[in-house]
Each structure stands twice: as structure tokens, then as C-alpha cells.
Image (cartoon, rainbow, N blue to C red):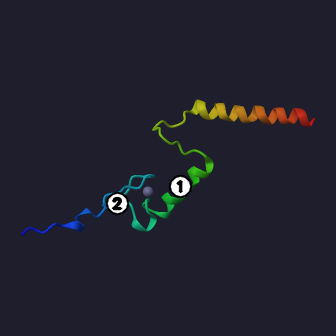
């Protein structure tokens, strides 16, 4: 008579997981990060809108300059209407 191990399907979530910020082994206390620092870094990314989903590409310097120029243009337009 062979026994069926039902409990063998336990999910392996916390084993071998890595911090998405720095790649260090995950700390269960700061899941899914390795430390409070990395949790803060990730949270800050969401707040500042720098989090890029579905792509591995980093924003280039040109992209950053372009967005700054855009903001300046908007500011100048606002100035014009105020004056
Ligand atoms: Zn980390």
C-alpha cells in the first residue's frame, strides 16, 4: 500500500526569492525585499513615477531632458497667461 503525499504541494514562495531592487536574498521580514532600505527605494520609485513596467529599458538621458524641456515649456506658457 503506497501513501499519497497530499502535503507535498506546499508553495515555495519564500525560498530562493531575490530582492527585486538589488538582487540580494529576500528577507521574509521585508518581503519581497531584502531590507527596509530596498522597500523604501521601491516605494519611492512608485511615488516618483520612475517605475517602468513591462520593459527592461532604462530611460535615456535624452528622454529625461525631453521631459524637463516639456515641463519648462508648460511653465513658460503659464507665465505668459499670468502676465
Ligand atoms: Zn535589496
Q: Residue, x 43% and y 68% (percent of image)?
A: 29
Report x, y in % for residue 57: 48, 36
Alpha carbon separation for disc pair 1 and 2: 22 Å
The quadrant in which the N terminus is found is bottom left
Query: Is the residue 75 above or below the residue 27 in the image?
Result: above
- Which dot marks residue 83? none
Q: Residue reaching furthest right?
A: 83
Quarter assignment of residue 67: top right
Q: Which residue is mark 2?
A: 13
State the residue position of label 1.
Answer: 41
Instruction: Please report the residue visible at 80 percent of the width from the left and 36 percent of the height from the top.
Output: 75
Label 2 environment density (alpha carbons within 10 Å; few <14, some 14–19, many ≥20): few
Relative to the observer, which residue lies in front, 52 or 13?
13
Indicate left or right for 32 with 14 as reference. right
Looking at the image, the residue that sits furthest to the front is: 1
Tell me the residue at 49%/64% (across/down): 36
Q: Is mark 1 within 8 Å of ligand 1?
A: yes
Amino acid at each position: 500500500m503506497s501513501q499519497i503525499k497530499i502535503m507535498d504541494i506546499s508553495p515555495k514562495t519564500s525560498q530562493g526569492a531575490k530582492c527585486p531592487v538589488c538582487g540580494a536574498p529576500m528577507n521574509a521580514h521585508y518581503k519581497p525585499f531584502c531590507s527596509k532600505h530596498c522597500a523604501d527605494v521601491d516605494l519611492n520609485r512608485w511615488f516618483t513615477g520612475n517605475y517602468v513596467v513591462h520593459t527592461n529599458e532604462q530611460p535615456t538621458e535624452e528622454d529625461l531632458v525631453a521631459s524637463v524641456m516639456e515641463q519648462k515649456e508648460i511653465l513658460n506658457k503659464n507665465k505668459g497667461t499670468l502676465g
